[in-house]
Image: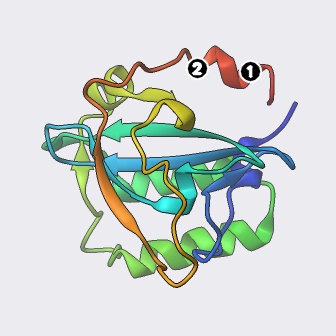
Amino acid sequence: NTNIIDKWHTKFSLKHDIELDKINRIEIKTTTKEERIHTFKHNQLTRKDVKVYVVSCLLEISEIGLTLNTLIDQIIELCEDINKVNELYALKKKCGINDQYEGMIFNEELAYLKLKLYDSSSIPQIKDDIPESITRITYDVNLANVDDIDFNALKEII
């Protein structure tokens, strides 16, 4: 059984957040807005050499709920790779988390209820060939009218 947390990469230069194996990737997108609109780099979606799944998280900020600090601590407990544990502690620092500030607070139950998974090939994207001289294309995509898929699709891979 694969520990998906240990598949998370800490290099922000890589195209996707999680590399399950040579051909399966997961990109995680999060928003605190009410609409499911996420920003993608063009080359995150238009891959022909790998299969990309997109996890879309809608977080509702609240005064009572799960703090970012607690969430990161829960991930650290599951992580078996010491280098990733160190990166998670560095992430806490980058987010300004300390003894006085626990980070953003969100409604955890609602976040799980609104969590969705998409096949990147069904997400609207530019299909035309892009000239090599044009680089770093990003666009916002509203996923409201995109069909999501069941998370069980990942069970076969993981």
Residue drawn at 25 percent across, 37 percent down: 36
Residue drawn at 57 percent across, 74 percent down: 12
Tell me if mark 2 has few (under 14), some (14-19) or many (20+) residues whose alpha carbon lies within 10 angstroms of its own.
few
Instruction: Check the image and report above or below for 55 versus 88.
Output: above
Quadrant into which the C terminus falls: top right
Q: Nearer the viewer, residue 63 or 20?
A: 20
Q: Secondary structure at mark 1?
A: helix
Question: According to the image, label 1 marks what residue?
Answer: 155
Whole-percent x and y of residue 99?
33, 74
**Distance from the alpha carbon under mark 1 to that under mark 2:** 7 Å
Mark number displayed over residue 151: 2
Mark number displayed over residue 108: none
30 left or right of 76? left
Q: Secondary structure at mark 2?
A: loop
Q: Nearer the viewer, residue 78 or 31?
A: 31
Residue drawn at 68 percent across, 56 percent down: 8
125 left or right of 158? left
Circles 1 and 2: CB atoms closer than 8 Å: yes
Whole-percent x and y of residue 30?
35, 49
Residue drawn at 42 percent across, 70 percent down: 137
Q: Amino acid at mark 1?
A: Lys
80 left or right of 115? right
Q: Amino acid at mark 2?
A: Phe
Quadrant of the image occupied by residue 113: top left
Whole-percent x and y of residue 104?
24, 58
57 left or right of 18? left
Instruction: Check the image and report above or below for 148 versus 48.
Output: above
Whole-percent x and y of residue 125?
42, 46
Q: Is residue 79 visible?
A: no
